[in-house]
Amino acid sequence: MTDLYVYYRVARPRLTEARAAAAAVLDAMAASSGITGTLHQRADDALTWMEAYRNIPDADSFLVTLDAAVDIAGLMVCLDGERHVERFVPCA
């Protein structure tokens, strides 16, 4: 199982739109994969956000579906830069 952490910076003028788009992405992923992600913001920077998805059985397939959900929700136009994906697996 893999945990995925996706972080990005939101463009300040699109903050409200970004919240709605990120919520749509999380909803789409829960509906399509059964995996409920969570949205976080950095404690010292309200424009840096992170989506967290835990216990993903097939991370490659999940990421393809996630990219499609991001496109459909229009999240990318709300960002200042790219989305960055980190994969973590248990140590033992």
Image (cartoon, helix red, strand yellow):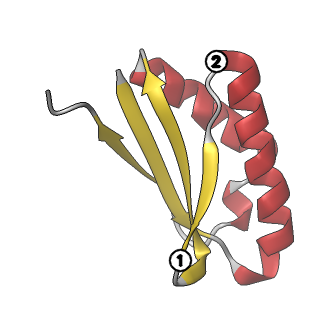
* Disc 2: which residue: 33
* Cα–Cα span, label 1 and label 2: 29 Å
Q: Are marks 1 and 2 in contact (CB under 8 Å)?
A: no
Residue 90 or residue 29, whichever sits in front: 90
Tell whether 25 sits left or right of 79. right
Q: Which image quarter holds the N terminus?
A: top left
Residue kind at label 2, given as amino acid type: Ser
Which picture quadrant has residue 72? top right
As helix, strand or loop, the secondary structure at mark 1 comes to: loop
Query: Sequence-wise, which precedes: disc 1 or disc 2?
Result: 2
Q: Position of residue 9 (x, y in %)?
A: 57, 71
Q: Position of residue 44 (x, y in %)?
A: 52, 84
* Disc 1: which residue: 43
Residue at horizontal 67 percent and vertical 56 percent from the top:
76
Residue at horizontal 64 percent and vertical 53 percent from the top:
39
As helix, strand or loop, the secondary structure at mark 2 comes to: helix
Answer yes or no: is residue 78 visible. Answer: yes
